[in-house]
């Protein structure tokens, strides 16, 4: 079976070679994607001798940035002239801080069961990404003292392998607990919050976002640290 | 975009937010006019750093929190440190 180069690079985005670290290849024109592979192999060849992978990793990150850069002149959907800015009522060291992420973390015995599916695997979440991005997001409440072993992560939009190994890469509740103990923040809210960010944007804007903001007000949270993925 | 919408909703409710973005999505924080954002030169899926790099996770978290005390107007700060792989295997 013959395959065009375009089909090849697109296959990394939910296709036969799906790899969410490299799904940006779908967005690069053929010539740029070809240049990415050329540079990657050149750096790899050099690494045979010096054994350092830092420049290889940096190359991949640089190309990921290119892959996600907005296309020049293309219309952008969510561009605002200005944004709300709330001033803190008290210093950080006296404030109650909550963590809120789109990393898709949840507590093992509190699976949000997307589409009613029990124990959905990461693979199924990736396979059903088209359904997720049309659906209302489910917010998981995660007690801040939850131990790492009881945390789970599932998100059809990014490679969760790092976040599954160490939640701190997208869900820094352990750091926040330390900062609370050290007095850097006044208090860590009893619960953190997470949802899989690959979800209906319109529902976030019209329903979930305002509802979650009201919930945060009701729980007397002073400041919110947000982590998108 | 999801978190940008959430940040705007929370700010509109009068509660300050600070967000941690990767460089690839810096334009999202800018286009959505977020109140406070820290941008890291890390890859997608690892906004705070590599698995096991607790020192980097702390550095990024503190940078985002400090904006609550320091930013008197909408502020975006890009951290200069390049991504580093953790030594953990």
Image (spheres, rainbow, N blue to C red):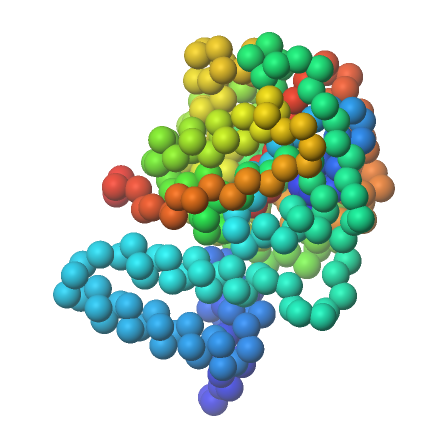
Rendering coords of residue A228 (x, y %): 59, 42
Residue A69, position as x, y percentages in the image: 59, 62
Front residue of this view, candidates B30 and A214: B30
Q: Left of A54 or right of it: where is A200?
A: right
Residue positioned 43% across, 58% down in the render? A61
Which residue is drawn at the image coordinates 80% and 27% (left, top)? B13
Q: Is residue A87 left or right of residue A69?
A: right
- Location of residue A132 in the rendering, given as x and y in whole percent from the top left corner: 68, 51
Against A11, residue B19 (above or below) is above
Residue at 60% from the left image edge and 10% from the top image edge: A94
Task: Name the residue: 58% across, 70% down.
Answer: A27
Q: Is residue B5 above or below residue A182?
A: below
Please state which of residues B87 and B13 is positioned toward the viewer in this rendering.
Answer: B13
Residue lying farthest bottom?
Answer: A2
Q: Can residue A56 be spotted in the picture?
A: yes
Quadrant of the image containing the C terminus of chain B: top left
Q: Position of residue A197 (x, y in %)?
A: 64, 45
Q: For residue A89, what is the image quadrant?
A: top right
The residue nearer to you, when weighing B67 against B19, is: B67
- Quarter of image, res A112: top right
């Amino acid at each position: 079976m013959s395959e065009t180069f375009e089909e090849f690079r697109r296959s990394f985005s939910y296709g036969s070679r799906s790899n969410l670290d490299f799904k940006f290849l779908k967005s690069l024109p053929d010539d740029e994607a070809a240049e990415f592979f050329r540079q990657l192999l050149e750096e790899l060849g050099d690494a045979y001798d010096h054994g350092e992978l830092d420049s290889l990793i940096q190359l991949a990150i640089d190309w990921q940035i290119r892959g996600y850069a907005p296309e020049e002149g293309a219309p952008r959907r969510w561009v605002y002239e200005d944004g709300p800015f709330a001033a803190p009522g008290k210093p950080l060291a006296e404030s109650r801080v909550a963590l809120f992420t789109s990393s898709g973390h949840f507590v093992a015995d509190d699976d949000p069961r997307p589409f009613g599916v029990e124990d959905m695997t990461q693979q199924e979440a990736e396979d059903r990404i088209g359904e997720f991005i049309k659906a209302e997001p489910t917010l998981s409440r995660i007690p801040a003292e939850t131990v790492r072993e009881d945390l789970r992560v599932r998100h059809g939009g990014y490679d969760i392998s790092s976040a599954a190994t160490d939640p701190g890469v997208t869900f820094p509740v352990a750091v926040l607990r330390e900062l609370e103990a050290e007095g850097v923040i006044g208090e860590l809210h009893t619960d953190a919050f997470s949802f899989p960010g690959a979800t209906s944007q319109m529902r976030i804007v019209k329903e979930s976002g305002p509802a979650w903001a009201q919930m945060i007000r009701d729980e007397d949270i002073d400041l919110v640290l947000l982590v998108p993925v | 975009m999801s978190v940008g919408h959430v940040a705007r909703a929370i700010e509109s409710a009068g509660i300050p937010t600070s967000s941690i973005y990767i460089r690839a999505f810096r334009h999202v924080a800018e286009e959505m006019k977020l109140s406070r954002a820290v941008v890291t030169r890390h890859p997608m899926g690892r906004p705070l750093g590599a698995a096991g790099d607790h020192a980097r996770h702390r550095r990024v978290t503190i940078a985002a929190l400090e904006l609550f005390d320091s930013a008197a107007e909408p502020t975006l700060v890009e951290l200069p440190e390049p991504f580093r792989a953790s030594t953990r295997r």
